[in-house]
Amino acid sequence: MTCSEWSKELVECARRHGIHAEPDRELRAHLALCAQCSERWEAELQLTAQFRAMRVHPAALRSLDRFAGEKRRESLMLDFARRDRRPVVPSRFTQAWVWGLGAAAALIVAVFVGHQAGKRTVPAKVSPGARTHEVRTEQTIIYEASNDASALSSDDFIAVPYTPPLAPGEMVRVVHADFYPEALASMGVEVDPSWAGDLPADVVVGEDGLPRAVRITENNQF
Amino acid sequence: MQPSDEELYRLMRKGNQDAFAQLYERREPALYRFALHMSGSSAVAEEVSHEVFVRLMGPSTRFDETKGSLESFLYGIARNLVRVVRRLGPVAEAVDRPFHHDILGELIGSETTAALHRMLRELPERYRDVVVLCDLEERSYEDVAKLIGRPVGTVRSRLHRARALLSAKLKRMNASPEVVTR
């Protein structure tokens, strides 16, 4: 082994055992022959001893000022407790979820409210082929028409314009039906545009099936 | 069974003060010693070991378990803080002043030890790190390799080199003490 290789050995040996280091037989033999390595060996032993002394130093320094160390520890723990009392700020990921769900909920509520408001204010569109009323046939009553069909108007009935007059003795039916306001309007009944939904009415129907007069029976719109 | 540093850290981040206190008790003394030997000042060492934990509990701590141990993270902070202090200039109160006022002072404050403290501070940082951790903190090569993020072989060769430098200085001091210890 070269001196360089031996020097590694002697450093490790000195570190392991300090001043009580006992080099093995081969190293001892080399130290006996090599003055340079022998000198290095002594220096390594001295260095190891000094390092051992230095290890005491921090503890000794602290023992001189133990009170300050306690105070520092105490203040650190107080800082920690103070920090822990601060409101917890959710992570960005959590915040994004909260905002997203909130927006979705607001959108659903807005759509629902808008739908309800639309139902109240905007009359439903009626396509030409759509049904304009619901006839409750079980409530149909049959009468004999008087000579003057216009007399129907006297009993809150409104004559449907542009329909042929009833013939004397013609059997008419009074049919209870739910009308859409547009259907009533088309029959000449005055309809408030703010009304929404169906309106219950009595309709006088001739034998030919054509309506002759209409009467709104109850109006829940007021 | 003792919880690991990383487990304590996780508890601490959830606001568990006991975990923080336990971590402090476990790691602060060694961090103080490390900072003391690296800086040569007990005041700086106190400040550094305190600041490490202030930073650890701060909101901007970026410790990542997958990149290394909490211990090496703490040593990293301490090393950087000491570096900053050293850049600012020489420390006012150095540990190499001999203690002569009591028995403890006699024990720890010999001229040789004081001189060695000074020599240690004059070493390049990469050598000083390994001497402090291996010879003063008595850590294994493997531990130190993890702490400083270098291979074991590098730690060993740096230590041998550092010890050779210190031995040479001690030899010169023994030959002419006035010149070296001044």
Image: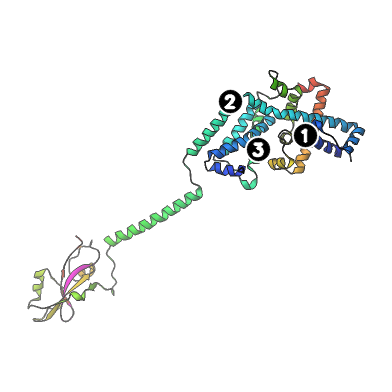
Residue segment shown in magenta: A195-210
**What residue is pinned by disc 3?**
B75
| Chain ID, mark 2 | A
Tell me, yes or no, whether dots 2 and 3 are on the same chain. Answer: no
Are labels 3 and 1 assigned to the same chain?
yes
Magenta-drawn stretch contains A203: yes
* Cα gap from disc 2 to disc 3, whole angstroms: 25 Å
Calculate the distance from the C-alpha at mark 1 to the C-alpha at mark 2: 36 Å
Q: Which residue is mark 2?
A: A67
Q: Nearer the viewer, residue A211 or B41?
A: B41
Q: Is residue B98 visible?
A: no
Residue A93's place in the image compared with B177, above or below, is: below
Label 3 close to label 1 by CB (< 8 Å):
no
Residue at the farthest left position = A147
Provide the chain ID for the residue under circle 1: B
Q: Tell me which chain the residue with mark 3 is part of.
A: B
Q: Is residue A154 magenta?
A: no
Return the residue found at the far right. Answer: A33
Q: Which residue is mark 1?
A: B162
Q: Residue at x 58, y 26 (%)?
A: A68
Name the N-terminal-most of marks 3 and 1. 3
In the rendered image, residue A53, in percent from the top left (x then y), is placed at 74, 28
